[in-house]
Amino acid sequence: MSAPAIDPVRTPVTASPAGKSAGNQRTTPARFDTALGWSDRPGLAWALRALLCVLALGVFAAPFVTVFSGSFSEKASGSTLSFLPHHPTLLNFQVAGERGIWDYFGNSLVIAGGGLLLQLVVCTLAAYALARHKFRGQALILTLFMLTMMLPEEVIAIPLSLVLGHVPVVGLDLKGTVWGVILPLGAWGFSVMVLTEFMKDIPAEIEEAARIDGVGELRMLWQVILPLCKPALGVAGVLGFIMIWDQYLLPLIAAKDPTDYTVTVALSILRTDPEVGSGVVLAGAVIALIPSLIVYLLLQRSLVTGIAAGATKG
């Protein structure tokens, strides 16, 4: 008979007093053990921590609830905290649609979808080369990827605008096209770093066994490495999409006409329009918020798993 499995997370068993068998002692899984000493028993400490959690939830959730309620209010105010809409109406969304918010929304979807796809492909190939192959200058290349994250957008705005207006060698003018926004987002140092560190932890024995079977580089990446990197791909996908979707300066300098703007730029236009109220701006903010929420809800499991895997290394 095999030995019974032992739960690794249990409270220590103290010596049983005289006259009592050790079998009557009961160990409880420490489901609520944390660095703060969280306990599942009600008490003053438990109530205090629950209150702190409610306050933290209110601080983070109140702005979102206010935006949603204000977008459905007839007379909304962005400076007033409101959890329920006053005189509910859909007029704000109708006015936002008349101002072209859905056209800008479509531009953002095309740019975010194409930019994220290109970014994942480029970053995955770069991470595979940096993690699974050894060559001279490897550390330097990874450092250069990291340095790109330290440059503010305002610093590279003017040079990037000149490059997009006349691309070197080919001499193309990418301003006024979706490629003018997608191509500069094709590589992101953060995604390269996350994927590289995750791929480094894949055992070399798996790769060696695949090479014995005659697996080539592309097949190795597609069928062996990538299936093991789903958590890291989830992190890169969620954060990459949000980064591209929230772009403001790049779509602004790459556009030739207001019809080329994205929804983030359109919100600033609505904000300065004297003919619309705060409710229309909040309705546009809700429309701009929906894709990010959908992407997060679809990939939240991979996001949490990837972050937890990176936090437990070593």
Image: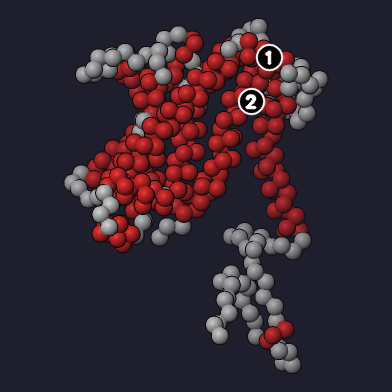
Number of other residues with Cα within 10 Å of mark 1, as a class: few under 14, some 14 to 19, many 20 or more: few
Q: At x 55% / y 82%, what residue is drawn? A: 3
Q: Is residue 13 left or right of residue 88?
A: left
* Label 1, label 2: how far apart the Cα atoms are: 13 Å
Q: Residue furthest left?
A: 136
Asked whether the viewer can see residue 196, the reply is: no
Name the mark on residue 286. 2
Residue at left 66%, top 32%?
64
Disc 1 residue type (three-letter): Gln
- The extreme front residue here reads 213
Which numbered marker is on residue 94? 1
Depth check: give the residue in front, 27 or 185: 185
Asked which secondary structure carries label 1, the reply is helix
Going from the N terminus, do you reach mark 1 or mark 2 first? 1
Query: What residue is rendered at 76% in x and 30% in y?
Result: 83
The image quadrant that residue 13 belongs to is bottom right
Residue 216 in view here: yes
- Work out whether residue 14 or residue 299 is closer to the camera in this orientation and state it: 299
| Image quadrant containing the N terminus | bottom right
Q: Nearer the viewer, residue 212 or 221?
A: 212
